[in-house]
Amino acid sequence: MIKPFVTLGFVKVVNLTSPISGKKFSKNVSRRLSSWTKGVIAQAIENVSRRRGSTVVHVNAAYTSQMDSRNGTLTGKRSGDKFYCEDGVVLQADVNAARNVLARSQDHEIGLWTPYQQVEAILLKRTECLRLKLLKQDSSCKPFGLSTESESPYAYV
C-alpha cells in the first residue's frame, strides 16, 4: 500500500504510471490490472489532497526502497519489511522508503524523468563519497549541492 508523506500542504508520491511487475498473468491482463489499480490509487490521492487543500508532487521512485534514508546512499539492504543498514541498524522498510520519497522531492539532481541508470550513477557517487568520508571536505560530493549539512533532507533519523 502506498503511504504518501504530507508536509506543508504537499503530498509526495512516486510515479504510478509504470506497470506492476512480477505477477503471473497474461500480458494483457497484467497491463489492464496494473493500469486500473494504479489509476484508482492515483485518483484517490488526488481527491484526498484536493479536499485537504494540498498539492500532489510526483517524484522519481528509482532506488527509494534500496537507499538508507539516514544518509541517502545505497549502503543498506531491504529484505521483506525490514531495511538492514550497513551499521547494523534495522529500519522498517516502508518508513525508510517513505522518508526517501520525501527527500527525493527536494533532490535537485534527480528529477521525475531521470532514467534509473542515471539515478543509480548519482547514488553510487554519493555512496562512494560517504565511504571515502569526503562529504564535508569536497564540495563536489555534497548531496544536492547544499551549503551545509543541516540543510540536507537526510539530516533527520
Image: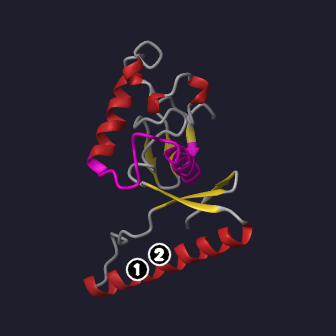
Relative height, residue 125 to residue 21 (above, below): above
User: At label 1, which amino acid type do we have?
Assistant: Ser
In x, y percent, where is residue 101? 52, 50
Q: Residue at x 31, y 43 (%)?
A: 120
Relative height, residue 94 to residue 133 (above, below): below
Relative height, residue 155 to residue 9 (above, below): above
Task: Give SS at disc 1.
Answer: helix
User: At label 2, which amino acid type do we have?
Assistant: Lys
Magenta residues, as a range?
Answer: 91-117
Relative height, residue 62 to residue 38 (above, below): above
Which residue is tagged 2? 38
Q: For label 1, count other residues whose C-alpha is less than 10 Å away and answer few (under 14), some (14-19) or many (20+).
A: some
The answer to which quarter of the image holds residue 56 is bottom right
Identify the residue at the far top of this view.
137
In x, y percent, where is residue 123? 36, 37
Which residue is tagged 1? 35
Q: Are marks 2 and 1 in contact (CB under 8 Å)?
A: yes
In x, y percent, where is residue 85? 49, 36
| Residue 87 part of the magenta segment | no
